[in-house]
Amino acid sequence: MPFRFVHTADLHLDSPLRSLALRNTELARLVRSATRDALVRIVDLCIAENVDALLIAGDLYDGSQTSMNTALFLAGELRRLDAAGIRTFVIRGNHDAQSQVTRELTLPPSVHVFSGRSKVVLAKTLANGRAVHIHGVSFADPHAPESLLPSFHPPVADAINVGMLHTSLSGAGAHDPYAPCSVADLQRHGFDYWALGHVHQRQVHSEKPCIVMPGMPQGRDINEMGIKSVTVVTIDDEGQVALEERPVGTAAFQRLSIDLTAAEDWRGVLDAASRELALLRRQLPADSLILRLALTGSTPLAWRLRRDADLLETELANIAAGLGGCWIEKVEVQCRAAAPIGRPAGDPLGELTALVEKDVLTSFGFRAEVRGLAEELLHQLPPELRQLMAADEDGLERLAVNAGLAGSAEALAHLHGHGAVEVVD
């Protein structure tokens, strides 16, 4: 019989809401419970597949904010695995290292939590007599600026070796460097499978040996998009590895761009949105789909969409609700104003709009000024909000550009300010 296990990481149980736009209390409650729902599904999957083990490669919790209630919930789910004869192997990540609860909780005997010193645990003996050994090292404190790879024991000879490591590898976008090492370093170490954690996007870095970052099983905001998953791993008697990605996330965040160039009136806007929302809902069959909409294109309705943003969001939320389990987290109006039919040549507002769009917004001086203001604002925010709004230099540039575009469009929309909005039955 092969050795089969489920590999996951970065559950961040009961993580506080990170999105600034979750104003809907029902939606906020849904997102808050989604990390627990994901763990329940993971345990259900382990039992249904009758795997040998669950490997959790760090960040079960979300730092020092962990409560005993969260820990008790975790213990209850691990007891379900224990009752099914399924072992659990856990390493502590940078967030877990901040939690005192982690060290105080009594877990079932089938759960092995690796310490900050390397240890090798026998997981199973296969039918041909080959042993499967799990190697793991936990974070001793929240920061690990140096590689933990030298702490690992060498592979056990004539056996199958699985390593568990919480690492940023050689650096990954918005993630701080934690226990950095390279894929080549891991390949050279001689293990058959590396169960990694820390980076929230799934990626198979190598197939021989198998080096897998499973991604998080449940996204928490719009920057963690899509239906999240775990990896089911099968290692046969000869050490051949097979991978299966299995979705477990109950809520999926997604961005959706809707081109309104062809929309001639308010009804046209809603019809275009209805089509795109229905299509995406069919493509992403998550229990709950949480969307950030970007309305784009050149249309004379750009003014009214910005001026009556509250009505627009209400109408779009009603359309989404009709699709079942679909929510609108935020609506971003990025449309450019097209000259309405019948507007006379030489119109002052039209000339002002052209001046702003062609000369002001594209100028180096304006962009530098807005970037400076955005940077000053970021410095006044807590670190977690800085990371959310602008994770890197490119993010800061996008934030500044979008702020300039949105601000100018808003001002022009108020100057335009004529005509009543149609109420669609």
Image (cartoon, rainbow, N blue to C red):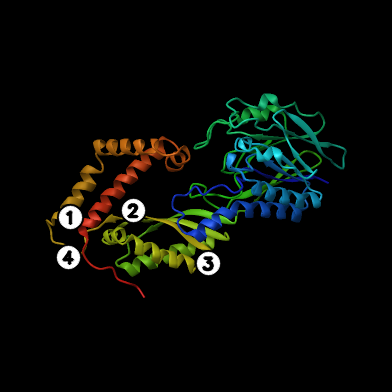
Three-letter amino acid code at the position of disc 3: Gly
Mark 4 and mark 3: Cα distance apart in space: 41 Å
Q: Position of residue 17 (x, y in %)?
A: 51, 49
Mark 2 and mark 1: Cα distance apart in space: 18 Å
Residue sitting at 18 percent across and 47 percent down?
355
Mark 1 and mark 4: Cα distance apart in space: 12 Å
Q: As rendered, which of 154 and 120 lies closer to the eye?
A: 120
Q: According to the image, label 4 marks what residue?
A: 342
Instruction: Kindly state the secondary structure of the residue where label 1 is placed.
Output: helix
Whichever of callouts 2 and 1 sits on the residue coming sooner in the sequence is 2
Q: According to the image, label 1 marks what residue?
A: 350
Mark 3 and mark 2: Cα distance apart in space: 27 Å
Whichever of callouts 1 and 4 sits on the residue coming sooner in the sequence is 4
Q: Which numbered mark, 3 or 2, is in the foreground of this view?
A: 3
Q: Position of residue 282 (x, y in %)?
A: 53, 63
Mark 3 and mark 1: Cα distance apart in space: 42 Å
Q: According to the image, label 3 marks what residue?
A: 324
Q: Is residue 421 left or right of residue 239?
A: left
Q: Are marks 3 and 1 in contact (CB under 8 Å)?
A: no
